[in-house]
Amino acid sequence: MALRRPPRLRLCARLPDFFLLLLFRGCLIGAVNLKSSNRTPVVQEFESVELSCIITDSQTSDPRIEWKKIQDEQTTYVFFDNKIQVKPVTPVCRVPKAVPVGKMATLHCQESEGHPRPHYSWYRNDVPLPTDSRANPRFRNSSFHLNSETGTLVFTAVHKDDSGQYYCIASNDAGSARCEEQEMEVYDLNIGGIIGGVLVVLAVLALITLGICCAYRRGYFINNKQDGESYKNPGKPDGVNYIRTDEEGDFRHKSSFVI
């Protein structure tokens, strides 16, 4: 009988190693005999590779083709139900470290390599959170909403009970991955301390202003330099000349006034 080639699988390697080694074995499953033209392909990271699957013998006219990956003794789907499947990688999570009571808080979880696009779920102290806190009486003191499509967890007004260790899991049909736990602390605002601090600052400013006013009144900030003209000798009358003699040691009248 003629050999049939199911749709080939074209992959882009994204493992952390420099090389990706895939091994394929010919086998007989459900009266379908398969083989591959290249059983030990080696490809560099981020380069494409084409994997072949050839049906040499089959007792069914429409066999179902599945691609799976075996790594670390774990099996995950790569191609199933006519769809390419990629397991999510570790998502990136952002959790605020400290938030005051009554304020809004937003937690983010993002993963960009899983296919199909993963769904997100958040956990607090290893307890799964519902998409809406109002739907579960266990979280009646909380006010949050989880968007499982975008991975965003929004608290409209945090409560003390919202403090804890948070982490996110991204999952699809091929598998799941989670980020590390991050702590969010919810603290009370010290209203009395804030008011006291404001009063202290106002009192200090008032004392500084009063001191400046007193210094002005006492003349500490007045310019004591006099106008240089006030220290000049008085002007001489018109028509009068003064001559200094050695005997007198002073000035004497030389000529009379002209009337």
Image (cartoon, helix red, strand yellow):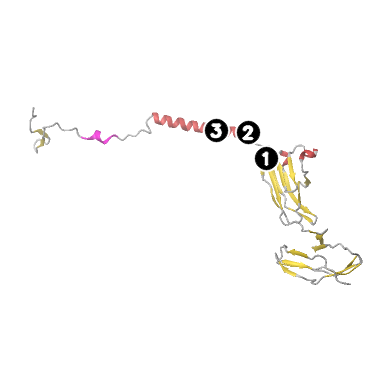
Task: Give the foreground label among 2 and 3.
Answer: 2
Q: Is residue 67 above or below residue 234?
A: below
Q: Amino acid at mark 1?
A: Met
Left or right, 58 with respect to 197, comes to right
Name the mark on residue 191.
2
Q: Amino acid at mark 3?
A: Val
Structural crowding at the residue carrying mark 3, measured as other residues with C-alpha within 10 Å and reported as few (<14), some (14–19) or many (≥20): few
Helix, strand, or loop for circle 1? loop
Task: Compare residues 3 and 34 and report the one nearer the observer.
Answer: 3
Name the mark on residue 74.
none
Looking at the rendering, in which quadrant would you find the N terminus? bottom right
Task: Compare residues 251 and 183 and report the one nearer the observer.
Answer: 183
- Indicate yes or no whether the magenta region holds residue 154: no
Task: Give the foreground label among 1 and 3.
Answer: 1
- Indicate yes or no whether the magenta region holds residue 228: yes
The residue lying at 79 percent from left, 56 percent from top is 175
Q: Amino acid at mark 2?
A: Ile
Helix, strand, or loop for circle 2? helix
Q: Are discs 2 and 1 less than 8 Å apart at CB?
A: no
The residue lying at 63 percent from left, 33 percent from top is 191
Q: Which residue is mark 3?
A: 200
The residue lying at 50 percent from left, 33 percent from top is 205
Q: Which residue is mark 1?
A: 104
Quadrant of residue 253 in the image?
top left
As measured in the structure, the alpha-carbon distance from the residue carrying label 2 to the one carrying label 1 is 18 Å
Extent of the magenta region: 226-232
As measured in the structure, the alpha-carbon distance from the residue carrying label 1 to the one carrying label 3 is 30 Å
The residue lying at 80 percent from left, 61 percent from top is 79
Q: Are discs 2 and 3 less than 8 Å apart at CB?
A: no
Q: Is residue 60 above or below residue 91?
A: below
- Image location (x, y in percent) of residue 257: 9, 29
Helix, strand, or loop for circle 3? helix
